[in-house]
Amino acid sequence: MNAERVARVLPGIRGLSLGLAVVTAEVLVLGLHLASSTATYTDPLALAYPFVWVNAALLGVWFADVPDAVGRRRLAAGVVAGGYLLVLAYFGGVLSPGYGLVGGADTASPGWYVSSGLPPGYGPAAVYESALATVVLVPYKLAGYATLAYLVYGTVVDAVRTGVAGVLGLLSCVSCSWPVLAALVSGVAGSGSAVAAATMDQSLGLSTVVFVVTVALLAWRPTFG
C-alpha cells in the first residue's frame, strides 16, 4: 500500500464523524437490548464480537482497492469468489443439509421463521428449513462472509492480471483459508437452537481474530507477482 493510496483512503472529518455515529448507534442498540432483555450474559466480549465483525467488514470494503475487470477475468473472479462464499457458508453453519438428508422427520413442513430475542448482531436471525437444505442467516456472518468474498474477488482479479506468478500466489494464499479453518472450530450447524447456542460460543473469539486479520490482509493485498 503506497503513500498515495493511504492518503486517498484515510477518512477525513466527515468519515470520522460517520464512524463515530456508527459506533454510537451500535452502543445504543446494545444498551437498549440489555435494558429490555431478561437474559444473563456471563461473557461481555461475546456481545461485542458481532460489532467487531460488522465494523471490520465496513473498513475492509472502504480500504480495499478492487480493480475493474471485464469479460473472462470478471467471470473467473466471480466464480472463485462465489465458490469461496459457499465454502464459508457451509463450514460457518449458514448453509447445512436439510432434515430430509440427515434423517429428520418427513412430516416437517419447509418454511422460514425468525429467531428473535438474540443479542444485536446475532439476531434477528432468519432461518429456512426444508428437506434439502437449512439456511441460517445470522447478521454478523452475512456481513463478514460477503465482505470476504468481495475481497477475494479483488484478489483474484489482481492475481489473474499479474499472470502465472500471481495465480500461483493466489493458490498459496494461506490467509484465504484461515476463516474456513476457524469456522471448522467455531462453526455452528443447524437452525434455531444452534443460533441461540452461538451466542455464548467461546471459540467465537478465535474466529473474530482470524476474520479481522484476514480482512486486513485481503484489503491490503500485497502484489502477488
Image (cartoon, grey):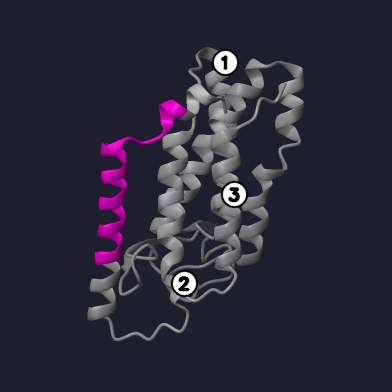
Q: Is residue 124 visible?
A: yes
Percent across and percent down for residue 142 are: 43, 51
Sequence-wise first label, 1 or 2: 2
Q: Quadrant of the N terminus?
A: top right
Mark 2–mark 3 Cα distance, whole angstroms, equals: 18 Å
Task: Read off the magenta span.
Answer: 7-28
Mark 1 element type? helix
Quadrant in the picture for residue 102: bottom right
Q: Do tag 2 and tag 3 residues touch (Cβ < 8 Å)?
A: no
Sequence-wise first label, 2 or 3: 2
The amino acid sitting under disc 1 is: Arg
The amino acid sitting under disc 3 is: Val
Q: Which residue is mark 3?
A: 213
Q: Is residue 139 above or below residue 170?
A: below
Percent across and percent down for residue 99 are: 51, 66
Q: Is residue 136 visible?
A: no
Q: Is residue 12 magenta?
A: yes
